[in-house]
Amino acid sequence: MMALAAGAMALPRMAAGGQRPSLKVAVQDLRTILEPVDSASIANVSWRVQYSIFDQLLRTDYNDNFRLNFALAKSLKQIDMKTYEIGLRDNVKFHDGSTMSADDVVLSLGPDRLRGEKAPGAAVLANFLSSLADVQKVDDRTVRLLTTTEDPVFTNRLGAWGTQIISAKAWHAAKNYDAWAAKPIGTGPYKIGDVRSGDEITLVAHDEYWGGQPPFASIRFKRVPEIAARIAGLQAGDYDIITDITPDHIAEIEGVKGLSVTGVETMWFRFLTFSPLKTPVLKDVNLRRALACAIDRDALADGLWNGRAKALNGWQLPIFGAINDPGRKGVSYDPALVKELLAKSSYKGEEIPYPSVGTYYPMQLADNQALVEMWKAAGLNVKLIMCENWTQVDNLGGIADTSGGAFYADPVSMLWQIIGPTNDLQAGGGWTNAEFNTLGHELETTTDLTKRKAAFKRMQDIVEIEDPCITPLHSMPFIYGQKADVSWQPSPLPQMYLGPKISPEPVA
């Protein structure tokens, strides 16, 4: 997506009379709290809707090797190790017609919305902007951002998530927070129209958008949980794009005239987490290592996804640049090692709970069932427990599904962000490791490349060998069905950008 956004532009069909068309998108699920920093919005199904509603100070172009571009900021200067001065783009209009100023940035990143202990964005701050200490107005077009410590990835954070700028005027005018969160005011190419709780969200073109006229008059996101119903709707012409297509359904779309399947190699991944502090049987390190080494990741990626997914055995990605270690082996499928580990363990065949909702991720239940069979073949008694919601999954502990991806080109955005102390596994009391947390803090607070590489290497040693709490599975493809005359480029992440093409302005 071109976050200023070449490559992710949607190219619409023109409706009769030259009018802009409307777009209809069928999705697997929706969240109707549309405030992007609300904790309920930290989800794949939220990001794909919100990405066309809000702009950030900077934005990462995931379709161009994670290049960082200017967005609502037009300049950025680092004053010292903990101070950044940002010049704001001129004449940016909010959805309510007001003009963006420094006051809006101060409110957007301030304690009432984001930085306060009880602010609705506290969880987003902890996950994405943990070093942000203060925002100060210099003048109407300039702000300064202060960090609590030196932060080697601070500018990357500004282009990831959490710096969406909202209208201070509209925030203060809202009746209460719930009313605000249902219909917040941003600056993106589309503004919020009708919202039908849990079922449908309509976005309407924001024709004063600073980046140009949006290509669609409106976009309607419709919740259609069943994949067969989404496909039938696409075939009948009810939808222009449908999300979360699985390999076993691709032929039903590719074989129909006027329809096509699209998708790109993703930077989003599926993982399993282990909760030894909630599940006594998992306190044995050798058992957790055995569970990880009993997984044939190639079989999952090739067998379930017909080669559209890639097996993942570690935490190295080429976009990490100098910190990446392509020679690291990671966790491999190794039946002989599994036998050795089990022989050294205290495991006597006790049941290991594996709770899952089974339907949130594409192919989730198939993954669940295949994993149980792999563990069974290795002598591991894992019980799949179907749950109605994620709260039930969290309460049961054991083994759990999760997903995550690289929001920017640094390992802080992967391993540390997924299982650091502010995220679900540790915050929920499933696992903790003091050395891992100390190293993660060093990774995100020093610019010394040698120290950063050493910290990241040691963090991987801990979670792969010494105190396993997470193990990777495979990439999670985002496959879309669509009408062939709707041209757009999906993102490697869950976000869907459907706004106009803007010439990118890279951050130096």
Image (cartoon, rainbow, N blue to C red):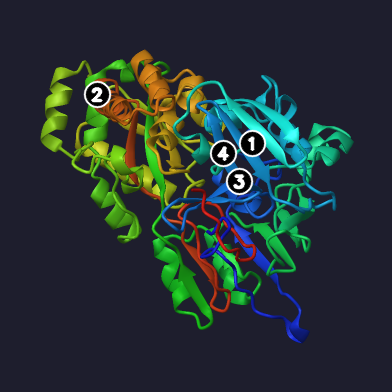
Q: Residue furthest bottom?
A: 17
Q: Are marks 3 and 4 in contact (CB under 8 Å)?
A: yes
Residue 276 in sight: no
Amino acid beneath label 4: Lys
Q: Which residue has dot 2 on it?
A: 287
Residue pictured at 15% horizontal, 38% vertical: 334
Q: Which residue has dot 4 on it?
A: 77
* Foreground tag (4 vs 1): 4
Q: Quadrant of residue 487?
A: bottom right
Depth order, front residue of 203/7: 7
Is 286 on the left or on the right of 257, as rendered?
A: left
Image position, residue 388 (x, y; %): 56, 37
Q: Which residue has dot 3 on it?
A: 75
Of the numbered discs 2 and 1, the one sitting upstream in the chain is: 1
Of the numbered discs 3 and 1, the one sitting upstream in the chain is: 1
**Location of residue 328 with respect to 111 vertically, above or below:** below
Q: Secondary structure at mark 1?
A: helix
Q: Are marks 2 and 1 in contact (CB under 8 Å)?
A: no
Amino acid beneath label 2: Leu
**Number of residues whose C-alpha sits closer than 10 Å to that of mark 4, classed few (under 14), some (14–19) or many (20 or more):** few
Depth order, front residue of 326/177: 326
Q: Are marks 2 and 4 in contact (CB under 8 Å)?
A: no
Q: Which residue has dot 1 on it?
A: 40
